Image (cartoon, rainbow, N blue to C red):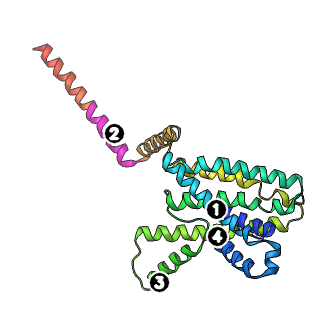
Amino acid sequence: MALVAGYADVVSLVRYQAFSSILTGNVVWLGRSIIDSDAAQKHSPFFYVAIIFSFAFGAFLHRLFELIRPNRGGSISTAPLAIAMLIVEVVYFFTEGEWHQDTLKYGVVAVSALFGVVASACSNGRMGIHTTMVTGHTLTLVGGLAKIILRVKLRNEERAKMLMSTMVIAGTIGGACIGAWAVLTPKIDHHLLLFPIPVIMIVLMFLHDHLAKPRSLIKKVQHKLRQHAEHFHRENSPVTSEADHDDEDCSASACSGSVDGDEEDSRA
């Protein structure tokens, strides 16, 4: 998710001069456009307000559906927003971004709403972390590094948080690099750069929700995998093999003893 956020932010910044998942950057642009008349000519303060409210609407929509359908809020709320974004991207593509330029610039609003869902799902869901910002993750890494320098033993939870923070930061940087490469590559049509985002977000939110509370099909698959793993472990474990061999010897001895006893009884 951090990879997708980094990619979408670079493309949105180049295309719309606004961030799609980072509210702090948009708030800074909002403050500048209020005072700087040159900046306001490019984008009015209302433009950045619309992005901020769109992000908040996506987060609100996720929480609403999460309360109605626990552990399904992400996938349910993502679907209509992804369709809306896809429609905007189709219009943007066929008009080459020139038709009603002042209107099409609000296409970033549809992108921001999707990342509002992502931010709410990741921070309030099973992951419990933000994947659309790196400030908190930087603080987590710095705090852990201070303990390591002082040779303070880290708890398993702290190690897991540091690992997750590293992955989020690396994913964001990687996504930004991919986005910058795509923007600078002449062979790639720039009007298509945001087309994959709606589909990817639907898949990611589906996986997020169903890994948090697996449905029957996923539960069956997990059960089968556990059975195969246990069977493989029993077959390849030397302790189990010896125990099974001893059980077989004991069973054979018991059977032979039973047969001998029956023969003696018949002779008597």
Q: Nearer the viewer, mark 1 or mark 2?
A: 1
Q: Counting residues from the N terminus, which is met first, the one under dot 1 or under dot 2?
A: 1
Mark seen at residue 23: 4
For label 4, the crowd category at 10 Å Cα-Cα, with few meaning under 14, some 14 to 19 and many 20 or more, is: many
Q: Determine the image quadrant of residue 112.
A: bottom right
Specify the principal SS of the magenta part: helix
For label 1, the crowd category at 10 Å Cα-Cα, with few meaning under 14, some 14 to 19 and many 20 or more, is: many
| Percent coordinates x, y for residue 53 in the rendering | 64, 63
Q: Is residue 70 visible?
A: no
Residue located 41% across and 75% down the image: 154
The residue that mark 2 highlights is 245
The residue that mark 1 highlights is 55
Callout 4–callout 1 Cβ contact below 8 Å: yes
Residue located 52% across and 62% down the image: 123
| Percent coordinates x, y for residue 103 in the rendering | 82, 60
Residue type at mark 3: give it. Ala
Q: What separation in Å lies between label 3 and label 4 (alpha carbons)?
A: 29 Å
